[in-house]
Amino acid sequence: MGGRYAYYDWDADIVWLSAGQAEHVVSEGMPWGTIDHDEVTGAVVAIEIRNASTRLPVTLLSALPGPRKQGDPARPQVRFVRAFYDRQADLVAIDLNEPGDAVDAIDVGRATVLVDADGAPRSIEIVGVDRRGAAEAITAVVARWPKLDRPGLLAAANAARAAPDREITVSSRVG
C-alpha cells in the first residue's frame, strides 16, 4: 500500500481513504465497508466506504477525485444538484452546488435564477410546477444558459415533486 490519498469511485460508489502504508494488511469487514490494518502494528492503513452516496455528504463526494492510474485520461467530473419541492408554495428550488455567492436574481418565464457576480447561475426556483410542470421553465433557463444539463435539471425537479417537502440530491457526470 502506498502513501496517503483519498478518492471517490463514481461507478462503484466507493470512497477509499488511505491513512498510511503497510507491507501486509488484514481486512476487517464492517456493515458499511472495510477497515485495513497493518498486520504487524494493527494501525489503520485504509478505509473503504461502500454505498458512499448514501453515507457521506454530497459536498465531500464532489470534492474527492476519481481513481486514476498514471497515464489514465482525466475521469469525468461528478456534479451534484439539490432540489426541494415546497408543496404549499408549489415551488421547486434547485441548488446547482456551484462555487460563488448569488448576488442577483433574473426572471426567466416562471423561473427565477439566482446568479453570481459573473452572471453564472447558482440556483433556480420554479413556481407553479404542480399545475404546469417544470419542463417549459427549465427549457427557458437552459436556452439562456446552454451549458446547464437540461435532463439533469428535469430529473431533479421531477424527483423533488415525487417526494415533496424533502431535499433530493441528483448527481450526473460532466465531461
Image (cartoon, helix red, strand yellow):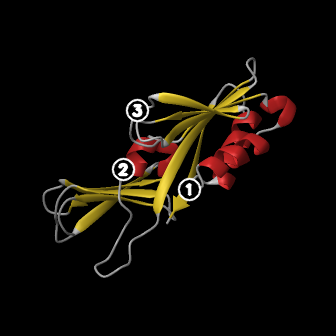
Q: Which residue is mark 2?
A: 63
Q: Residue at x 52, y 65 (%)?
A: 11
Q: Residue at x 60, y 55 (%)?
A: 146
In the rendered view, does 86 fall on the left or right side of 121? right
Q: Nearer the viewer, mark 1 or mark 2?
A: 1
Hey, which residue is sitting farthest bottom in the picture? Answer: 71
Is residue 117 placed above or below 16 in the rendered structure? Answer: above
Hey, which residue is sitting farthest left in the picture? Answer: 41
Q: Secondary structure at mark 2?
A: helix
Question: Mark 1 to mark 2: distance in Å?
Answer: 21 Å
Which disc number belongs to residue 147? 1
Q: Earlier in the sequence, mark 2 or mark 3?
A: 2
Q: Position of residue 8 (x, y in %)?
A: 40, 58
Q: Position of residue 59 (x, y in %)?
A: 41, 42
Quick one: 146 or 74, which is closer to the camera?
A: 146
Which disc number belongs to residue 94? none
Quick one: 65 or 174, which is closer to the camera?
A: 174
Q: Position of residue 101 (x, y in %)?
A: 40, 32
Is residue 92 placed above or below 33 in the rendered structure? Answer: above
Q: Residue at x 56, y 51 (%)?
A: 171
- The amino acid sitting under disc 1 is Lys
Is label 2 in contact with label 3 (beta carbons under 8 Å)? no
Q: Which residue is mark 3?
A: 101
In this orientation, does residue 51 appear?
no
In the rendered view, does 84 fall on the left or right side of 51? right
Is label 1 in contact with label 2 (beta carbons under 8 Å)? no
In the rendered view, does 35 fall on the left or right side of 92? left
Q: Secondary structure at mark 3?
A: loop
